[in-house]
Image: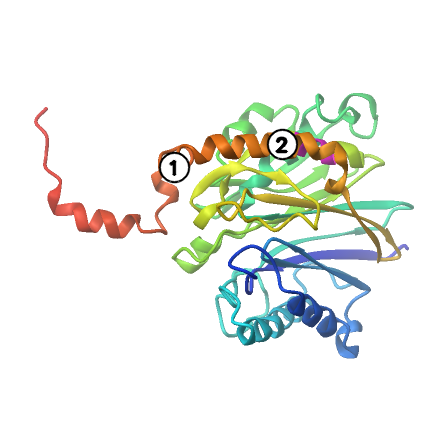
Amino acid sequence: MSERVTISVIKADIGGWVGHSSVHAALIERAEEFLSREPHRQLLIDHYVATVGDDINLILTHERGVDCEEIHQLAWDTFQACTEVARELKLYGAGQDLLSDAFSGNIRGLGPGVAEMEFVERASEPLVIFMADKTEPGAWNYPLFKMFADPFNTAGLVIDPKMHAGFRFEVHDLIEHRKITFSLPEDMYDMLVLIGAPGRFCIKSVFSKETGEIAATSSTQRLNLMAGRYVGKDDPVCIVRCQSGFPAVGEALEPFARPHLVSGWMRGSHSGPLMPSSARMASPTRFDGPPRVVALGFQLADGKLVGPQDFFADTAFDNARKLANDLADYMRGLGPFEPHRLHLDEMEYTTLPDVMARLRDRFEEMDE
C-alpha cells in the first residue's frame, strides 16, 4: 500500500455498567451498527470497537489524514448514538465525556480523547493500541520513555542500527498550553525533569531520528481542564508502531511488566498501580480500580486491521498483576493521606475549593 494511511483512536466514557466498571454490550452493539452503516463505511477502510473499564475506544483506519472533520464527526455521532442507549438503560454517567451538545468541526476539546497518526504503510506494519482506564494522559510518560529511550528495556537502542541514533519526543505542557521537542539521548536529563511531573507534562508523540517517521502518539486531553470541574479521569489511549526501526512488540510491552504508580483510581483523586489486564479482565472494581491498561495488537494490511491480539492476556504478566495488587494493598492502607490521595493542587476540581472557602475565616495569622 503506497498511499498514506491514518489510524485514529478516539475514546469516550458515555455510560458505565455498573457504576464505573465496564461497558454494557448494548453500547458496543450500537457502536458497531452505527459505524457499519453504508454512508459511514465509505469514510473508513476499517474499524474496531474496543473497551477498557467504562470507556468505548473507536479504532478507525482511513485515508483522510489527522484532524479530519468527517472522521471526528463520525466518532462524535457514534458516541451520541451510544449515549442514547446509555440513557435508556440509565447507565451511570451517561454522556459524561461529551462536554457539548453540538459538534464544532473537531472533536478535540469536546471531551473525548484522541490519538491519531498518518504514515505510509510498511511491508509489515505491526501496531499496539494501548488503552487505559482510571488514569490520566501522563500515565504514558514512563512506558514511552522506557520503550524509546531506555536501553535496559529496549535492546534495539544498542544493537539495531536503525534505532541507535535515538528518537525525538514532543512533550506538551497541559497547563501553559505549549510544547517542546527533545532529542534523545542527548536531551535525556532535561526531558526527565519535565515528564517526571506527569500531571502537567505529557509525551504527545515520538519520532525516529533515523527516518523522521512517527513512531508513537497519545491522547493528551484533560477533562477537568476543559470542563472547569471534575467530570471523570481522562482514560488515555496511545498508538505505538513496532519493529523495523521501532521497538519490537516485546520491547513495547516490557515497561508494563513492572507496574508504575499513576494518578486516577477512585474519583480520579488517588495514586495507584497501572495494572496490565486482558480485555476480559479490564473491569476495575476494587475502589473502582486499580487503574487498568489493555494492549491490543494489530497488523495493518492495506489499511485493514488484522487482529486483535490481546497481549496482556499472556501469563507472563501474572507477576505484574500480583505486584499491582500488592501495591494496591499498600496504597489503600494510607486512606485519605498522601501519597495515596493526590496532592492538593491536583484536587482543585473536587471538594477542596468548597472546604477551603468554608474554613477561610477560621485561619489565624501566626507570630513569626
Q: What residue sits 62% from the left and 56% below the top?
A: 114
Instruction: Give the x, y percent position of residue 27.
Output: 64, 68
Instruction: Give the x, y percent position of residue 343.
Output: 37, 37
Q: Residue 112 versus residue 171: which sits nearer the camera?
A: 112
Cα separation between marks 1 and 2: 21 Å
- Quarter-wise, where is residue 213 in the image? top right
Instruction: Decide if residue 281 is on the left or right side of residue 84.
Output: right
Location of residue 318 with respect to 185 vertically, above or below: below
Magenta stretch, main secondary structure class: helix
Query: In this figure, which colouring scheme has been used for the structure?
Result: rainbow
Q: Which mark is residue 335?
A: 1
Crowding around mark 2 (Cα neighbors within 10 Å: few <14, some 14 to 19, many 20+) is: few
Q: Residue furthest left?
A: 367
Is residue 253 inside the magenta stretch?
A: yes
Q: What residue type is labelled 1?
A: Gly
Q: Residue 322 carries which label?
A: 2
Is residue 23 inside the magenta stretch?
A: no
Location of residue 327 with respect to 299 vertically, above or below: above
Picture quarter with the C terminus: top left
Q: Is mark 2 on a helix, strand or loop?
A: helix
Give the mark nearer the N terminus: 1 vs 2: 2
Q: What residue sits 79% from the left and 26% below the top?
A: 156
